[in-house]
Image (spheres, rainbow, N blue to C red):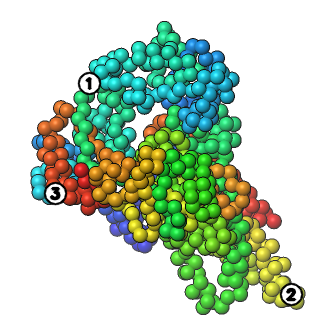
Amino acid sequence: MKKNFKKYFAYSFFLVCFSCGTKQSEQSTAESIDSSKTSNGNSSTAITIKGSDTVLPLSQKMAESYMKSNPDASITVTGGGSGVGIAALEAATTDIAMSSRSLKAEEKLTLAEKNIEFEEKIIAFDALAIVVNNKNKVDRLTREQIEYIFTGKYTNWKEVGGDNVKIVVYSRESSSGTYEFFKEHVMEKKNYAPTVLNMPATGAIVQSVSQTIGAIGYIGLAYETKEVKPIAVSYDEGKTFVLPSLESAKDKSYPVSRPLFYYYSKSLAEKVKPFLDYILSVDGQKLVKEVGYVPL
Amino acid sequence: MLKFFPKRLFEKIIEGILFLSSTVTTLTVLLIVVFLFKEGLGIFNQRPIGKAEVIIVNRVNPVKHLNAEAIKNIYDQKITRWNELGGTKDSIILFSLDYISDYFNEDELGENFANLPNKIDSLVSNNPGIIAIINEKYWSAGFHGNKVEIDKITVWEFLSGREWFPTAQPAVQLGVFPLILGTLIVSILAIIIALPVGLATAIYMAEVAHPQIRNILKPVIELLAGIPSVVFGFFGLVVIVPFIREFFNLPVGETALAGSIVLGIMALPTIITISEDAIRNTPRDVKEASLALGANHWQTIVRVIIPYSISGITAGAILGIGRAIGETMAVLMVTGNAAVIPHSILQPVRTIPATIAAELGEAPQGGIHYQALFGLGIILFIITLIINFMVEYVSNKGKFK
């Protein structure tokens, strides 16, 4: 009997503790919501940024160092993809939408319908390197050749002047911004061949290309390593070939590069200006290089 | 002292909590299933293009009817003339809002795109070969063009389609047949690899091994179950994939076989633990009766112990398949994820869980792609449900023997 009594006591003790615990946590979340409200009330110092996962690491780094020098500023950065960020801009649930592509015609139309006048700022450039295995003889390709490789028209390296080796094409998953960028920019919106291998991360592409002789893939310039060989690309049907590098991306001679955008409503221009100024400053652009993108 | 203690009250409270938690669990499971079906079944009877979009062609164009595959081939420029689709000899001119800047500048479109509908109308009426995909609101009945009917997605098309391009513009291709096939091939092969090894280990541990060896083996196998699947995936990508490529002299090592080997290793702990339990549950008197009849240890294992524990072993194997079918991360990393119908186990495949994991993050909520992924979830759910019923059936059969 006594044992049982102890057990029940222990149970009830746990219960009390448990309920107290949840109550406390509720209170603390309520408090944090309150505090965020008040900081929003102070207007100019709280900024929300949402959108492209490509721009995300850059924005995070910027926000971090900006908040270090401006202790009363609070910047919240969330990812989700370019489309998500622009949708949030349309719904006015974010101050800045970050995007790895310019607005689509339809998105401009929606913004126009909602009477939102927007401002567009390029904050950095991102370049894609097209890479092959180190043992591959081929070191230059035209845009058309790359398109034919990725749409499955070419299947052997000898068709582009290489050895008699089957081409193995690596791409990112369709959820990646890079996937869309490559499709639009290099393949002129044609679809990838169904035989293309989809990898979940850029690191996996580097790994696979480095160990597969017939491989070709694309990676962000920042990821370039000695384990894979970058290809010189020509966008003028073979007249000039340019190797990807920070310099060639910066002077825009390397064609497979894209601007990274911030979009914000004109009505909020004053609120976001100090932060934007910081990004475009020398210090800010230094961070761009650190994160692995190409400064303006 | 004890007399006054409200013992019944505490009992009631505890009972209440137990009842509540079991009810909540059941309801949660039911809700998840209802949610899955509600989201997934929405895919059928939808058109494979955007919800409010229409496809417009010139009045003189006799084509009235297009399916998703034809639209994709048109926009991929694999079909370039209308006569391939039963129309005139005109070559096809592509148009969608993405191409608008090729035709008009912003001044022509007017403020807030006020002139857009008229511009589209003139474009369509002036080009006999045009195909335009636009939002319904920029089109009105008085304009000079024909709307083309788009075939809706049917259950049969979804299950038997051979192309999976859920983000293709303008018409998505939702054929899940290669994905179902990929999932089944990888899982079945995994179990073919894992079952003999797992069974051998289980027999060894339960019957042959010295207790001291067993005390070392058991925790090691349990450790195997505790390794995160992404670690298995990375191991597979760096070790197994290059090995397969070199051993079979293939152009690419990311294959169904690589996925099955990784999954086989991951299914081992389940198979070993459950089979070993089943084998150890063989009653002592049955074993001793066999030995007393003059059978040696090996004969006893083969003729008595395994037949006695076969239902437990089968249950272990089926649960192992269950784990293999649902596994995501490891497979995502080593199978190459190309949605093609594999002709051999040495080709890349794409599995259902890998597809859901890789794509759900960027699929717009409520869109066709999102619903298609839930549709895949339903297929996976049905497969695992069948497996669970099989476990139930097999283990019941054993009990009443």
Numbered badge on residue B295: 2
* Disc 1: CA contacts within 10 A as few (<14), some (14-19) or many (>=20): few
Choose mark 2 or mark 1, whichever is in front. 1
List x then y, in percent, for residue A106: 39, 29
Residue type indicated by callout 3: Asp
Q: Which disc, if any, is residue A115?
A: 1
Residue A122 visible in image: yes
Which chain does the residue under circle 1 lie in?
A
Q: Decide: marks 3, 2 in contact (CB < 8 A)?
A: no
Q: CA distance from mark 2 to mark 1?
A: 89 Å
Chain at numbered mark 3: A
B80 over B263 or under it: above or below: above
Q: Tell me the SS state at disc 3.
A: helix
Residue A99, located in which quarter of the rendered image?
A: top left
The residue wearing badge 3 is: A283
Residue at image point 77% right, 65% down:
B398
Tell me, yes or no, whether the two marked residues, 1 and 3, touch with CB atoms within 8 Å. Answer: no
The answer to whether dots 1 and 3 both sit on one chain is: yes
Q: Relative to A4, does residue B66 appear above or below in the rendering?
A: above
* Amino acid at dot 2: Ala
Q: Position of residue B132 (x, y in %)?
A: 51, 24
**What residue is at 65 percent from the left and 33 percent from the top?**
B154
B111 or B174: nearer the viewer: B111
Chain at numbered mark 2: B
Marks 3 and 2 sit apart, C-alpha to C-alpha, by: 84 Å
